[in-house]
């Protein structure tokens, strides 16, 4: 996914509400904001990445419908992280009590929390080092489990706080473990 950054002078950065309004008024574009206030414009994904992301979301949402442990979000959802960044993972999940603790106004805008689980799905134009840095940012802001999926290399990088990053291949299903009990992603769906 191509990305373009817009840098504003430090004294000209958007407040959270101004940034939300800016995004709404430019809804034909997808934005993220770094902790330093840099606005990143992201291009749409290609068909293969879109199809793969749909498979991930469908599996996650299907698991959540059965277990009712939280809420599932797609790649259009921006989360306002504790470090000031606003990021949009390709798929995410937030545990029920954390979501319900937010006011309706907070739920309508960019929720002021870090998801418990995030998935970043690499597309052909993504750089591995840049995406790994983003995964570290998720962990540093409270994410309990993150999957960085690189379909071209058929690898998944598994991130958990305090643990070394695990690398798995696509030759077996991916289990979420205690963070999302019973959630298993069949990686062959992403071929």
Image: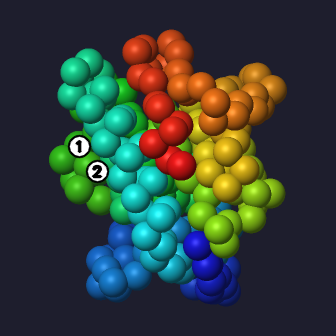
Residue found 42% across the figure and 14% down from its top: 181
Near mark 1 (Cα within 10 A), the count class, few <14, some 14-19 or many ≥20, is few
> Contact (CB < 8 A) between labels 1 and 2?
yes
Residue 30 visible to the viewer: yes
Query: Left or right: 52 with respect to 54?
Result: right
Q: Secondary structure at mark 1?
A: loop
x, y percentage for residue 29? 40, 82
Residue nearer the viewer, 93 or 13: 93
x, y percentage for residue 188? 51, 39
Q: Secondary structure at mark 2?
A: helix
Checking the image for residue 3, the label placed there is none
Near mark 2 (Cα within 10 A), the count class, few <14, some 14-19 or many ≥20, is some
- Name above or below for residue 76 compared with residue 148: below
Query: Left or right: 175 with respect to 51?
Result: right
- Name above or below for residue 5 compared with residue 73: below
The part of the image, by quadrant, that contains residue 69 is: top left
x, y percentage for residue 99? 30, 35
Residue 84 visible to the viewer: no
In this figure, which residue is indicated by the disc labeled 1? 103
Residue nearer the viewer, 167 or 42: 167
x, y percentage for residue 91? 43, 47
Residue found 19% across the figure and 47% down from its top: 104
In this figure, which residue is indicated by the disc labeled 2? 106
Residue found 56% across the figure and 68% down from its top: 33
- Name above or below for residue 6 compared with residue 20: below
């Amino acid at each position: 996914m191509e990305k373009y950054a817009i840098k504003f002078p430090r004294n000209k950065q958007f407040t959270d509400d101004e940034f939300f309004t800016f995004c709404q008024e430019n809804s034909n574009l997808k934005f993220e904001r770094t902790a330093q206030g840099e606005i990143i414009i992201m291009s749409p994904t290609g068909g293969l990445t879109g199809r793969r992301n749909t498979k991930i979301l469908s599996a996650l949402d299907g698991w959540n419908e059965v277990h009712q442990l939280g809420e599932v979000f797609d790649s259009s959802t921006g989360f306002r992280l504790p470090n000031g960044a606003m990021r949009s993972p390709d798929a995410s999940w937030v545990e029920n009590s954390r979501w319900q603790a937010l006011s309706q106004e907070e739920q309508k805008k960019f929720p002021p929390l870090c998801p418990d689980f995030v998935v970043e799905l690499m597309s052909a134009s993504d750089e591995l080092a840049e995406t790994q840095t983003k995964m570290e940012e998720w962990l540093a802001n409270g994410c309990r489990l993150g999957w960085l999926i690189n379909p071209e290399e058929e690898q998944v990088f598994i991130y958990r706080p305090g643990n070394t990053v695990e690398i798995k291949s696509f030759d077996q299903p991916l289990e979420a473990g205690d963070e999302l009990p019973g959630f298993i992603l069949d990686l062959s769906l992403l071929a």
